[in-house]
Amino acid sequence: MPNHALVTATTADTKSEKLAQRLSRIIARLHQGEHIDKHQLAAEFGTTIRTIERDLHQRLHGIAERNAQGQWQLTLTARSTIPARHLHGYARMAGTERLFPDASLPYLLGQLNTPEPHRATHVQPVPHEDLGGGTRTFAALQAAIEQQHTCHFTYKTKPRHAHPYRLIHKNGVWYLAAEEAGRLKNFSVALIEQLQVDSSAPFTPKRTHLDYIANKDDVWFTEQTTEVLLRIAPDIAHYFARRQLLPQQQHRQDSDGSLLVTTQINHINQLLPVVRYWLPHVRIIQPTDWRKRLIQDLKEGINLLKI
């Protein structure tokens, strides 16, 4: 004769385990920042919509709430931690998504859960300007971009009237990409003074400007570029081959190990600091007048040292 009490207890235990597993998986997905649809949950767990509604309404009361689209999300009071999926979003926003060879979530969480003295990795920070005193200016510019409002400010003692497009971070410095008198320009945020946002003067961003900014890998904004040809010595060729040091850089390795590099430059001052840093291992082949300009600058610098 079967023991009905034992069978009933076993069935109850099984139901409790399924309920616990279902609720734990729902909570885990909520903490990942997902917006959950009750119909999808019912199909996924092989149960009825009524059961899922009981889970969300009663068993997860105070943890889950329905949003304006009819889906379920974590309540504001329950959001004590940042969803793990936001780690990847932050890495993309900060430009560090390729910092580690392994960009998987388990690896990143493993690094964060390891106390710093015991980590095998150490990332040296890149120097950044301190905009702590310019928080209001930065926030006002960001709002003006989002709301498409015209800005008035003083820049290098000159009054400016501009349409703001984007805040861009490059080499530790924040720049404002804005249109002034029909031309797209960049302004160092730290040098912007007496900012006034004119909410009564909205503007419509130009698609050509938006596309131009999105495709640029620097903050030099000019319509015309100059193609520059460089010869990189074998001793430092790997520095140019492993990552782009110049805009739209392309290279070809010759049999002697040197690199022939082409780049698109907006202004000569965008190129010369890089070339001077790597002298004497970098040579400007074309344009020849830029090579002459570099030689002239070097001669003048040497003469100044003699004084």
Image (cartoon, helix red, strand yellow):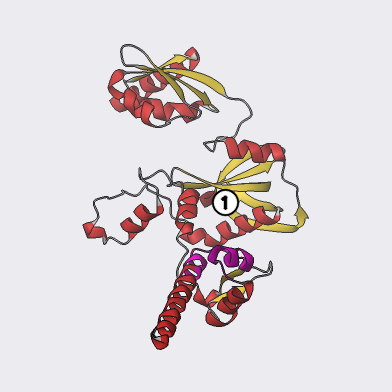
* 210 left or right of 117 in image: right
Tell me the element at label 1: strand
Q: Does residue 265 appear in the picture of this structure?
A: yes
Query: Residue drawn at (60%, 39%), measured in percent from left and top?
Result: 213
Is residue 42 within the magenta segment?
yes
Q: Quadrant of the C terminus?
A: top left
Task: Give how far across and how far down residue 145 sits, in percent.
Answer: 65, 53
Q: Quadrant of the N terminus?
A: bottom left
The correct choice, above or below, for 12 with respect to 225 in the image is: below
Q: 182 or 154: which is nearer to us?
A: 182
- How many tags in the picture? 1
The correct choice, above or below, for 280 with respect to 180 in the image is: above
Q: Which residue is mark 1?
A: 192
Q: Which residues are magenta?
A: 26-47
Task: Give how far across and how far down residue 118 sits, in percent.
Answer: 22, 58
Q: 69 or 140: which is nearer to us?
A: 69
Question: What's the residue type where badge 1 is placed?
Answer: Ile
Query: Residue drawn at (67%, 38%), measured in percent from left and top?
Result: 209
